[in-house]
Image (cartoon, rainbow, N blue to C red):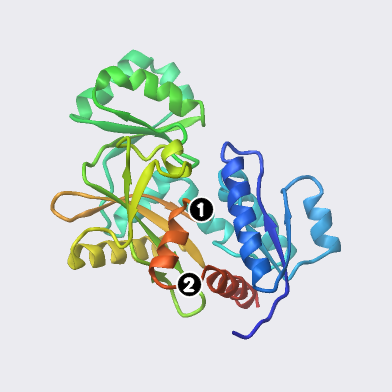
Amino acid sequence: MNRKISNVLVLAGGISHERDVSLRSGRRLADSLTAHGFTVQLRDPDASLLPYLHRNRPDVVWPALHGASGEDGTLRALLEITGIPFVGSTADATRLAWEKPIAKTLVARAGVRTPASITLTRDAFRELGAVGVLETIAEQFDGPLVVKPTHGGSAQGVTMVDDSAGLPRAMVDAYNYGETALIEERIVGTEVAVSIIDTGDGPVALPMVEIVPRGGVYSFEARYNAGETRFFTPARVDETVAQRTADAALLVHRTLGLRHISRVDFIIDGVGTPWFLEANVLPGLTETSLLPLALEAAGHDLGWVYTALAEAAVRDNG
């Protein structure tokens, strides 16, 4: 590999609900890059960040920030202004993926199936009357639902609802994490994640990871506590379904304008149709995260891939 960079700034932490996960991702990323010969600094995105960037311009910045601090597009827009290369999607693409209802609309228009849903702001929920709103929703959606915040990740604020009796509590939980809730038809099937990397030759879908939580729900605890979830890589689906899902993930990646790295989550139903749930511009890099599992299943060395992605960021900035 033609090394073009030596100094990498990894941003981790932030003030979102996913701060601890971000710190774990950032540390593992920094350790991997250091082991491959980079000079790496790991720091929080605080008030000293922008002055630091102006004084000590790193060769590349790698945002390892989960939640709003790294995935709503704001930080990336500021990095674009500085002109310093950074790994990951642009600010505009990041905003599209961050807004789950917008991402669902764009993906559906591109031809990928996504569960039926309705989006409700907290203010509308109150002003229109919670009882009447929930009754209307229960009439429209005949079956189990998923209620989640429209922003964020790591399954925080996400509730599986079996019937209308569970909706009020689910709405409260979602609103604890944001001002807008997404109420979505629950698709029964196999939960999978397709990670995508692009080191310069176009996006490539990695082996699909099948997710089987011990408790039946891929909750925050199931994601980050070792032993709470079983993973199968590649997923236990036939080749036709696997290819169909990989093609859908690549279409989502391109439709939202993502770059370098992403992860697209699906439920595959009983007839082999992948249903789009959400796209992540910053997949987790912890010891229980799905992207590292997919990279290892594909036979890739993590440090080599992280190096290639950092170099891709520099090329794309040129």
Marks 1/2: CA distance? 22 Å
Residue at the front extreme?
Answer: 227
How many labels sit on residues? Answer: 2
Under mark 1, the amino acid is Glu
Q: Determine whether label 1 and label 2 are within 8 Å by CB.
A: no
Image quadrant occupied by the N terminus? bottom right
Identify which residue, 262 or 209, lies in the foreground: 209
Q: Which residue is mark 2?
A: 198
Where 294 falls versus 129 (above or below)?
Answer: below
Q: What SS does tag 2 mark?
A: loop
How many C-alpha atoms fall within 10 Å of the one at disc 2: few (<14), some, or many (≥20)? Answer: some
Where 265 falls versus 181 (above or below)?
Answer: below
Residue at the right extreme?
Answer: 55
Identify which residue, 220 or 155, lies in the foreground: 220
State which quadrant residue 307 falls in: bottom right
Image quadrant occupied by the C terminus? bottom right
Does any portion of residue 137 appear in the rendered image?
yes
Q: Which of the two marks, 1 or 2, is nearer to us in this view?
A: 1
Is 180 placed left or right of 71 in the picture? left
Where 157 falls versus 84 (above or below)?
Answer: above
Is 202 placed left or right of 61 in the picture? left
Identify which residue, 214 or 70, lies in the foreground: 214
Identify which residue, 249 or 42, lies in the foreground: 42
Is 30 placed left or right of 173 in the picture? right
State which quadrant residue 246 falls in: bottom left
Q: Which residue is mark 1?
A: 287
Q: Position of residue 204 (x, y in %)?
A: 40, 72
Is 79 placed left or right of 305 in the picture? right
Q: Earlier in the sequence, mark 1 or mark 2?
A: 2
Q: Position of residue 264 (x, y in %)?
A: 39, 56
Q: What SS does tag 1 mark?
A: loop
Identify which residue is drawn at 31% across, 60% down.
110
